[in-house]
Image (cartoon, grey):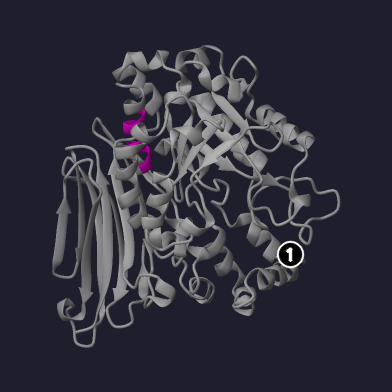
Amino acid sequence: MPSKGVESYTYLTNTAFRMDFSVPKNERSETEQNSMIKTNQQVDSGNISGAFNYTGPYTWEALVNGAKVASKTNQISSLTGNLEGGDMTDMMNMPSIIGTTGSQSYAVSYGFYDAGPGVGGLTNQDQCYAYLTDCYESWMDGLVRAFPAAAAKPFHQFFLPGVHDAGMNTMNSANAILDSTSAVAVKAALIVMFPVVGTFAAFNAATAIRNLAITQKDSFTAMLNLGIRYFDFRPGYLYSAFRGDNDNTLYHQHNLIPGAQYEDFLYELLLWLKNHPSEIVVLDLNTQGFAEDDMKPSQTDLNGAMHAAFTSAGISDSDLVPGGLGDVSQTYQQLLDSKKRLIVLDQIYGGVTKYDSYQDGAYGTLTPGPILGALGAMNRTDQAKYNFTVLQIQGTATNVDGVIAPAVVSQSNTSSPLMSTKADFDNQTLPWLLANVNNNLSNDYLTVVLNDFGDNATVSFSISVTKQRMSL
């Protein structure tokens, strides 16, 4: 009998939580706390009612104290393996869910990968993660309330959950260019970037961009509410072939693909900080991976965007003062007292240096082993040569031979190769962080974890590592 497999991943943090996963005639309930759990279920045609009916539902349900608070379903063909409809058919429309039922707050982060037949080493099993945790919207405040000694710890002892290529959470900027007179230039650039499949990439430009450049799917506000406290943002001018005369607008740049506008990001971030006076956020500014040197922003335009965002958000110096690298040695309480709740690490003009686990060879992988190896090679001696430390746990599947073609010719809106590895990598890298970071690295340097598709499980593990680093 033909079947299509789905690998489900979950993580729970509370005895009140339960996750249910089901396909026809196969149901599982998960209640184990603080463990990454992986299961495989098959949408099997032998279990689907009706003659010549090969399509069956895959469903997950999140329950809090027995009450269903979230549920998503996809219809999957056991014959072709294709998605035939459902709630998780577009990667850009799978927002995290945050709420409260009774007195219990909760957060759900989820994503789905529509697997093909396994071309280029990609898995042939659909992938779905659905993490159900407590709400970490004000986790720094919660940590200090539970452990008052944390308020007197240097801020660099926090282990911050962060998002990689933070501004690549929207297709709006790319779609605007594809709808403009610059569309021809975009398609020409894609042909140059991907010579083997360039014609397909140009023909299917929006899908190519979504699957090869998008690294996040939540709004900045949602990321912050999930507990994300570090943003890898790469502000720059548009690629020369797309840029109009005297256009100094800054966007997050992924090679030559623009994401969110920098000023819009800052505005959203500042409004959130204004409403969350107990929380501190770190912003890392860099120009890694820019396609052209001319995309590098001027100091004047960077400052202008920051000033404009403060003005638009109605925030004065009495509300919030940007800090810098020198401030991370102050205590959490000192930073709150001085209103320095936005720490800017400027790698563009500020001379800030980063100790980074990322290596092209190790991270161009479809399996987590090489990444675990890169993380394990990080050590205190080398750490001391830099200003802060970044542990990246997402892969760069797009660097793997054979992955690009299926990503650009796909007709599915949830077939990103980055999503294909997301859950499996989380399943192994997050427990590794808890077991090794405090032993391998010093708490004298601000240390962060970067992930694609920022989520609440990454935040939960980061809080636990923070407690280790603070000896709480």
Dominant secondary-structure state across the stretch colored magenta: helix
Judge left or right: residue 35 versus residue 378.
Answer: left
Image quarter in which the N terminus is found: bottom left
Against 161, is 399 above or below? below
Q: Residue at x 34, y 23 (%)?
A: 143
Against 44, is 422 above or below? above
Residue 26 magenta-highlighted: no
Structural crowding at the residue carrying mark 1, measured as other residues with C-alpha within 10 Å and reported as few (<14), some (14–19) or many (≥20): few
Please state the horizontal and vertical placement of residue 304, each as a whole percent of the image. Answer: 75, 33
Judge left or right: residue 367 versus residue 398.
Answer: left
Q: Residue at x 38, y 69 (%)?
A: 114
Q: Nearer the viewer, residue 353 or 76?
A: 353
Please state the horizontal and vertical placement of residue 193, each as a whole percent of the image. Answer: 65, 68
Residue 341 lies in quadrant = top right
Residue 57 lies in quadrant = bottom left
Q: Amino acid at mark 1?
A: Ser
Residue sticking out furthest to the front: 381
Q: Write down the region rendered in magenta.
A: 458-466
Against 340, is 12 above or below? below
Please state the horizontal and vertical placement of residue 235, each as a whole percent of the image. Answer: 67, 44
- The residue that disc 1 covers is 180
